Image (cartoon, grey):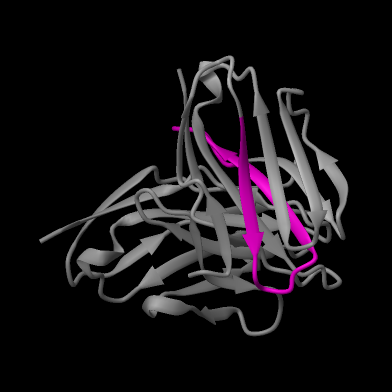
Amino acid sequence: ETGVTQTPRHLVMGMTNKKSLKCEQHLGHNAMYWYKQSAKKPLELMFVYNFKEQTENNSVPSRFSPECPNSSHLFLHLHTLQPEDSALYLCASSRVAGGQETQYFGPGTRLLVL
Amino acid sequence: AQSVTQPDIHITVSEGASLELRCNYSYGATPYLFWYVQSPGQGLQLLLKYFSGDTLVQGIKGFEAEFKRSQSSFNLRKPSVHWSDAAEYFCAGRSNDYKLSFGAGTTVTVRA
């Protein structure tokens, strides 16, 4: 599927690095999401953007900083991360449609923090 | 709390045999329910969804799921599995807001 793309697919960074994850959706959706998927844990919703406005910040540490410049692009800026932040970061998008909306996911960025 | 639960962490099934994955939900009203599949190193792919209407929902890859209000369940089934069905399967639910609640996932192993 190419509806939601994420780059890079893999990232290794040190704890003092600054990096960014990029997500792009080609589905004409108006809501975008960041999820964290750690081993042996359920998916955790991190951030939600609805019509470019952040509507959810699920108690995420400030070392994660999202940016949504338009309804097609979503970034996750990373700085001074910890080893426990190593995980698969998934982006998703949906069309807000009075309840009957479906989230479509990208392939994820596998992040390793050393 | 509103949630979905997948009781089975791991299921092993022989190729060609039938598969059923369990999902239970806990919502005050009828939720919107989804099944996603995740192959190793990949994102989540939508298999099927239930919003309302016919309680038996057909999805991609030969999967179907049945919504049973009396049992608060939305189990996923496939009559004959293929080796390519080996993956992790997630049930998810949502009420009228946008927040999806995911189960812990069920890993399916297919043996020859």
Q: Is residue A35 magenta?
A: yes
Q: Using residue A38 as the reference point, say whether residue A91 is left or right of it.
A: right
Q: Using residue B7 as the reference point, say whether residue B32 is left or right of it.
A: right
Point out the residue furthest to the left here.
B112
Residue depicted at 50% across the width and 54% down the height? B90
Front-lying residue, B17 or A25: A25
- Where is residue B2 drawn, in percent x and y? 73, 46
Q: Is residue A2 above or below residue A73?
A: below
Q: Which residues are magenta?
A: A19-43
- Where is residue B56 drawn, in percent x and y? 54, 80
Residue depicted at 32% across the width and 65% down the height? B19
Residue depicted at 63% across the width and 73% down the height? B50
Q: Image quarter for residue A21?
A: top right
Front-lying residue, A27 or B104: A27
Q: Number of labelled discs? A: 0
Q: Is residue B39 above or below residue A62?
A: below
Front-lying residue, B31 or A106: A106
Give the quarter of the figure containing the C terminus of chain A.
Answer: top left
Q: Using residue A97 as the reference point, say whether residue B74 is left or right of it.
A: left
Q: Image quarter for residue B86?
A: bottom left
Q: Is residue B51 magenta?
A: no
- Where is residue B76 drawn, in percent x and y? 45, 66
- Where is residue A41 drawn, in percent x and y? 51, 33
Q: Is residue A39 above or below residue B44?
A: above
Residue depicted at 83% across the width and 57% down the height? B97
Q: Is residue B57 above or below residue A69?
A: below
